[in-house]
Image (cartoon, rainbow, N blue to C red):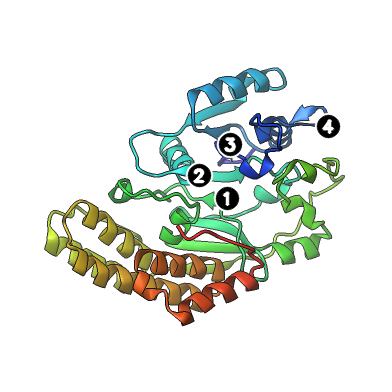
Amino acid sequence: MSDRILTILAGGSSRRFQNNEGRWSDKVLKEYNNKPLLVHLLEGCRRYYDLVGISVNTKARKRTYSKIVNSYITNKFVKYIIDFKKVAFEGVLKGIYSTMEYFENKSIQFIPSDRPYLLFEILKELKVKPNGVSIFKYSDGMIEPLLALYGSNSRISSKFLNLSLSRADVPIRLSQYIQTYCIDDLLKKNDLSADIFTNINVQGNLTREITELDDLSNICIPSPENIEKQSELILNDINDYEDVLDVANELMEKEHFYAAYLLSLSSLKKKKLDSEVFKQIGKEALLKEREYWKVKNLPFLELHALQDLITIFPEEQTRDNMSSVIKLKEKMKIKSRRLK
């Protein structure tokens, strides 16, 4: 069995999955091969995990899932994590944060609830450092931020809980260590279909049967590429204006550029920093973060740093920056992505 906890992120609204009938349909409960998608995931992973978490956003959802899951699998195998209310985080990040806090000091493998073809034989072979995260990356630079393995000490600082952040890349950008596993190499070395990473966006995606491969005991996991920042992310007590400036500059010196940006944004909201100084520090941090991910060949994170820059600081919506956004999206075949 695995020494880590698997958690299924199942609190989304499934907007693209809805049809025109006017009644909302919960994607994870969609019957497929005579079982809900959620049950397929639980049955597929129980050989490899002693405990599985299901992240939900309401108590009502927990009750619904618990009743259905219990008709197939013992609920003793499952723990439900309801989103914490006293944080400003939104969306999937709220679920990720709540799970990290619930399973304190545990390594956590997150998976989306709409990946019925996943092979858990692959997930259990991933390695992670206590202060790090392991992620899947495609050759074009696109990553799978919802399919991430976090180490036992990889958590989001309480300094940022007043920020209305929502994206799953937030804890990745804050991590000290990032290990990237190339999906294309993994598939090629093991003669596997790319379908195993396919997600169910619309009801028409449910087109093929979920099958188990005969023998994956000798599966080959390519060595990951490693990114390591200069030091562990430590945010001590910050009491006043001068402390914020000193800590933000120290964070940037140690390559924690995104943490410096979030600290300056949080301090602005707490009125520990005025808008002009925030503009100076926050802009410098995002500019440096963008360049950092560019050098590290992670265009997905480079794109998000650039999107944050031009969203928070409208004067950065220059022709060159907007052109760079388009080029990065084209490189990773991203059709559209809202600036947020």
Disc on the earlier residue, 3 or 2: 3
Cα distance between the residues tagged 3 and 2 = 9 Å
Q: Which mark is residue 10?
A: 3
Disc on the earlier residue, 4 or 3: 3
Tell me which amino acid carries mark 2. Val
Q: Which mark is residue 92?
A: 2
* Residue that appears at 69% across and 37% down: 45
Disc on the earlier residue, 4 or 1: 4
Instruction: Measuring from the top left, give residue 318's x and y in whole percent.
Output: 43, 79
Q: Indicate the secondary structure of the residue bearing disc 1.
A: loop
328 relative position to 266: left or right: right
Q: Are marks 4 and 1 in contact (CB under 8 Å)?
A: no
Q: Which mark is residue 146?
A: 1
- Please give the residue where the numbered disc 4 appears in the rendered image: 33
Q: Which mark is residue 243?
A: none
Disc on the earlier residue, 3 or 1: 3
Tell me which amino acid carries mark 3. Ala
Q: Quadrant of the N terminus?
A: top right
Tell me which amino acid carries mark 1. Leu
Label 3 neighbour load within 10 Å: few <14, some 14-19, many 20+: many
